[in-house]
Image (cartoon, grey):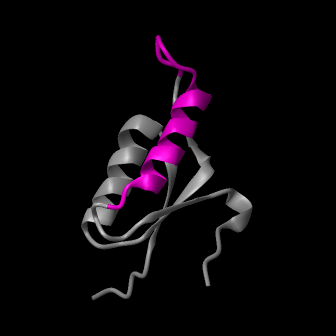
Amino acid sequence: QRGIARVVVCGLQSEFCVDTTTRRAMALGFPVTLVADGHSTMDSAELTAAQITAHHNRLLSQISSFGPRTRCVPTEEVRFD
């Protein structure tokens, strides 16, 4: 209705806000571009922030159950045309 073709996601707390926003966008039928180096978090007791971010980059780009997929790309590959 508003002409939105895809959602680009970056931000803080990869395991919370970024994960939820990405999944919700896919559930609503939007393809997602996840900016691989455009989100982060804080270290947990078990994992570093870099490990958590890498995990979510991998995990979110592998989900296919929603139909639309998530493409995980570095900042320099994000295009708004």
Residue at 31%, 70% in the rendered image: 67
Residue 49 in the image: state x and y as whole percent: 57, 27
In this view, the residue farthest toward the top is 45
- Does residue 37 appear to the left or right of 16 in the view shown? right
* Quadrant of the image containing the C terminus: bottom right
How many numbered markers are drawn? 0
The magenta stretch is 43-64
Is residue 35 covered in magenta? no
Seen at 57% across and 29% down, the residue is 51
Q: Main secondary structure of the magenta part?
A: helix
**Residue at horizontal 68 percent and vertical 56 percent from the top:** 74
Report x, y in % for residue 55.
51, 37
Q: Relative to the observer, which residue lies in front, 79 or 29?
A: 29
Quadrant of the rendered image containing residue 13: top left
Q: Residue furthest right?
A: 76
**In terms of image quadrants, where is residue 40?**
top right
Q: Quadrant of the N terminus?
A: bottom left
Give x and y (percent) for residue 10.
52, 52
Nearer to the camera, 10 or 34: 34
**Up-down: is 70 above or below 57?**
below
Q: Is residue 53 left or right of residue 6?
A: right
Q: Is residue 62 magenta?
A: yes
As displayed, is residue 24 above or below residue 51? below
Whole-percent x and y of residue 80?
Answer: 61, 78
Measuring 28% from the left and 60% from the top, which residue is drawn there? 65
